[in-house]
C-alpha cells in the first residue's frame, strides 16, 4: 500500500468516477484502475463497486475511506512543511473565481504571488459563482473566490473584500448623475447577469429587501459576463447594476452614466471558499494569507 494508491482511492470515492478522478490527478484511467486494483489486492478486499452509471464504496471501502483520508492528510502536511522549509520552490494551485474578482482583482495579486514564489504554478479559472462552488465541491480547484455564499455543507466561506454595486445607465440618460427612488426601476429595461452569478444574487437580495422581486422588473436580457452587460448599457439597450470594480474606469471616461438610488445600501462582499475538510496545500495557504493582507490594505 502506498500514498499514490490511497490518493487514487480517495478521489474515485469522492467523485464516484474513475474518469473524473484520472482527469483531476493528471493520470490515465487505466493507471487509476491499476492503482485501485493493486490496493485491493494488497488488502485482500474489494473497496469499490463498479456499475455503468457510478462507483460506490463497499463496506470495506467505507471503513478505509476516513482512515485513508487522514493518512493522506498527514502525508501532505509533511510535504507542505518541507515545501515551506524550501521557501515554496515547487507547487501547484488552481483558483476558481467569479467574474469580478477573476477579471479585475486576482490577476495582479497572482502576479505578486508568482514574483514571491516563482516555482509555484498557478491556474485561474473564471465562471459564475455557482460554477466555481461546483468546481470546489468536485475538487477541481483548491480555492474559490466568489460573490455570494452558497448552501454547501462541505465548503467553508470567509469574507474577503467589500464591493459596491453601482447603477449604470447609457451616456446622456435622463438619470445620469442623479438620485432616484428605487420604485423608478420598475419602468426601465434591466440587463442582468446569468443565473448563478454572484452579482445577480446580491442584486436580488438587495431589491427583495426593498420589497421588489424579479417578477416586478422589466428584464431586457441576461448576459454571461459583466463586460458584456456594460457594453449593452453603453449601446443604450437598458440599465444595469454592476460592480464598481468593473464600472469605475468606464464611468470616469464618460462612457457610462452613474445613478444613485436613494436610501439603498448597495454594498456586497466577496468570499474565499475552501473545501472542508480539505487536503493540506501550503501554496493555497500562502496565497490566502496574501489575499488577507490585500484585504487589510483596502480597509
Image (cartoon, helix red, strand yellow):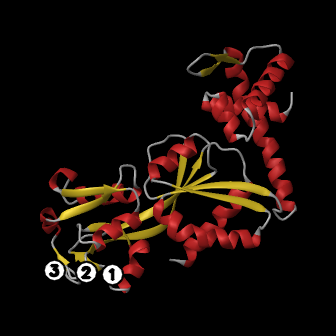
- The residue positioned 84% from the left and 16% from the top of the image is 41
Examine the image and state in which quarter residue 147 appears: bottom left
Query: SS for tag 2?
Result: loop
Q: Which residue is mark 2?
A: 171
- For the residues bearing labels 1 and 2, Cβ distance under 8 angstroms: yes
**x then y, percent, for residue 202:** 35, 58
Query: SS for tag 3?
Result: loop
Q: Establish if 240 lies above or below 149.
A: below
Numbered mark located on residue 255 in the image: 1
285 or 259, nearer to the observer: 259
Measure how far apart labels 3 and 1 are at the Cα level: 15 Å
The tag earlier along the polypeptide, 3 or 1, is 3
Query: SS for tag 1?
Result: loop
Task: Answer few, some or many: residues within 10 Å of disc 1's Cα (few below 14, many 20 plus, some between 14 and 19).
Answer: some
Mark toward the viewer: 3 or 2: 2
Q: Which residue is mark 3?
A: 174
**x then y, percent, for residue 121:** 73, 59
**x then y, percent, for residue 257:** 27, 80
- The residue positioned 87% from the left and 61% from the top of the image is 85
- For the residues bearing labels 3 and 1, Cβ distance under 8 angstroms: no
Task: Answer few, some or many: residues within 10 Å of disc 2's Cα (few below 14, many 20 plus, some between 14 and 19).
Answer: some
Q: Establish if 267 lies above or below 61.
A: below
Mark toward the viewer: 3 or 1: 1
- Left or right: residue 100 versus residue 254 is right
- For the residues bearing labels 3 and 2, Cβ distance under 8 angstroms: no
**x then y, percent, for residue 296:** 56, 74
Amino acid at each position: 500500500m502506498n500514498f499514490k494508491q490511497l490518493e487514487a482511492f480517495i478521489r474515485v470515492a469522492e467523485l464516484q468516477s474513475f474518469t473524473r478522478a484520472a482527469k483531476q490527478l493528471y493520470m490515465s484511467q487505466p493507471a487509476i484502475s491499476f492503482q485501485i486494483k493493486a490496493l485491493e489486492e494488497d488488502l485482500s478486499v474489494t473497496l469499490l463497486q463498479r456499475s455503468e452509471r457510478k462507483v460506490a464504496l463497499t463496506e470495506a471501502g467505507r471503513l478505509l475511506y476516513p482512515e485513508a483520508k487522514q493518512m493522506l492528510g498527514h502525508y501532505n502536511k509533511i510535504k507542505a512543511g518541507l515545501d515551506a522549509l524550501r521557501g515554496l520552490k515547487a507547487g501547484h494551485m488552481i483558483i476558481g473565481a467569479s467574474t469580478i474578482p477573476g477579471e479585475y482583482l486576482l490577476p495582479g495579486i497572482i502576479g505578486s504571488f508568482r514574483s514571491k514564489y516563482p516555482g509555484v504554478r498557478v491556474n485561474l479559472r473564471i465562471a459564475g459563482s455557482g460554477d466555481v462552488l461546483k468546481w470546489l465541491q468536485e475538487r477541481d480547484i483548491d480555492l474559490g473566490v466568489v460573490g455570494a455564499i452558497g448552501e454547501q455543507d462541505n465548503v467553508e466561506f470567509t469574507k474577503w473584500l467589500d464591493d459596491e454595486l453601482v447603477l449604470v445607465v447609457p451616456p446622456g440618460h435622463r438619470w445620469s448623475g442623479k438620485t432616484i427612488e428605487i420604485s423608478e426601476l420598475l419602468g426601465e429595461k434591466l440587463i442582468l447577469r446569468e443565473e448563478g452569478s454572484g452579482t445577480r444574487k446580491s442584486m436580488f437580495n438587495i431589491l427583495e429587501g426593498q420589497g421588489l422581486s424579479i417578477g416586478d422588473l422589466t428584464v431586457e436580457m441576461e448576459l454571461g459576463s459583466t463586460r458584456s452587460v456594460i457594453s449593452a448599457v453603453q449601446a443604450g439597450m437598458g440599465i444595469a447594476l454592476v460592480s464598481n470594480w468593473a464600472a469605475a474606469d468606464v464611468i470616469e471616461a464618460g462612457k457610462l452614466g452613474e445613478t444613485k438610488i436613494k436610501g439603498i445600501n448597495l454594498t456586497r462582499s466577496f468570499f474565499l471558499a475552501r473545501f472542508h475538510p480539505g487536503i493540506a496545500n501550503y501554496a493555497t495557504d500562502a496565497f490566502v494569507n496574501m489575499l488577507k493582507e490585500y484585504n487589510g490594505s483596502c480597509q
